[in-house]
Amino acid sequence: MFNMMKTAILMAAITALFMLIGRWLGGQAGMMLALVVALGMNFFSYWFSDKIVLKMYKAHEVDDSTAPQFVGMVRELAQKAGIPCPKVYLIDEDAPNAFATGRNPEHAAVAATTGIIRVLSARELRGVMAHELAHVKHRDILISTISATMAGAIGMLANFGMMFGGRDSEGRPANPIAGIAVAILAPLAASLIQMAISRAREFEADRGGAEISGDPAALASALDKIHRYAQGIPLPAAERHPETAQMMIMNPLSGGGLRGLFSTHPSTEERIEKLMAMARGA
């Protein structure tokens, strides 16, 4: 519940930032133009996201005849989650990771690398796939697309501001130095909010996955193992397409320190701590 509220607050914040920056830099017309362009850019990505990302990772669909145990696990967890069983894919990569994609629960897919199936126990893998199904159930692809749309629109408004300058409340040219500062800082603030939304959704998917599987300790163990293995095994497709890293259960491109503010995922230690608290409570 806390992370859902946090997501709502962050979505409101990025919307308010868009409205303020739009009025200051581009006026009403500039604000609407930036929103329309950003919506158009993200609509295609949202509608075809599953096909695009699955092709990027060279994923191949599996069924009861080619991967009966894995597909059966996903089907059983989907029933527990109360959603249609998504299409199931495998990716021939040693790096242990998994992701969910699709515009809604009726048009969803989950994918896992062959590496994650090798290194995790059946119980741990069950926790991971429950996490991915929680993303599907919570419609996180839609949420991330909306936040990306708003962040993209703010970036466009910043470019408008750099080219044409801002306007005050009476339509007169604003202070050029202030305009440059806003044009630089606004996209930065939008990115920070967008990353914070992504981290909140990961916490919520951890919680939802633990509830679906009924085994938060198994998901915690899986995250610890994935984190340790992923340090030394690259995921080439994620390196070529860093924009897809946010979809993974573990960000293959993550960094610590100040870079954590721009990370799409919370720290593994914090995720494990919350899951183990759930396990103790259960």
Image (cartoon, rainbow, N blue to C red):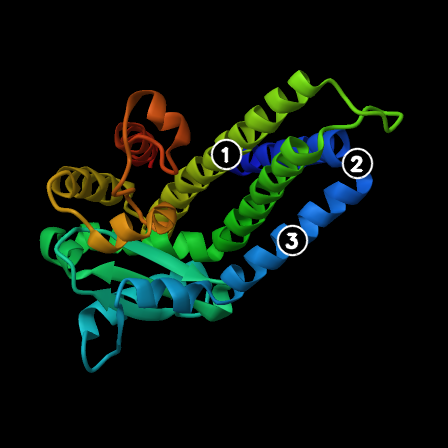
Tell me the amino acid under the disc marked 2. Answer: Gly
The residue wearing badge 1 is 191
Q: Which numbered disc flags the more N-terminal residue, 1 or 2?
A: 2
Whether 253 is drawn above or below 109: the answer is above
Q: Which numbered disc flags the more N-terminal residue, 1 or 3?
A: 3
Residues 282 and 79: in front is 79
Q: Which mark is residue 128?
A: none
How dense is the environment of label 2, judged by Cα within 10 Å: few (below 14), some, or many (20 and up)? some
Q: Secondary structure at mark 3?
A: helix
Q: Which numbered disc flags the more N-terminal residue, 2 or 3?
A: 2
Q: Secondary structure at mark 1?
A: helix
- Residue at image coords 69%, 31%: 21
Whether 172 is drawn above or below 62: the answer is above
Residues 206 and 175: in front is 175
Q: CA distance from mark 2 to mark 3?
A: 16 Å
The residue wearing badge 2 is 27
The reply to whether residue 76 is visible in this rendering is no
Instruction: From the image, state whether disc 1 or disc 3 is nearer to you.
Output: 3
The residue wearing badge 3 is 37
Tell me the amino acid under the disc marked 3. Answer: Val
How dense is the environment of label 3, judged by Cα within 10 Å: few (below 14), some, or many (20 and up)? some
- Residue at image coords 16%, 64%: 92
Tell me the amino acid under the disc marked 1. Answer: Ser
Residue 119, percent across and down?
Answer: 10, 51
- Residue at image coords 50%, 34%: 191
- Residue at image coords 79%, 27%: 167
The reply to whether residue 241 is visible in this rendering is yes
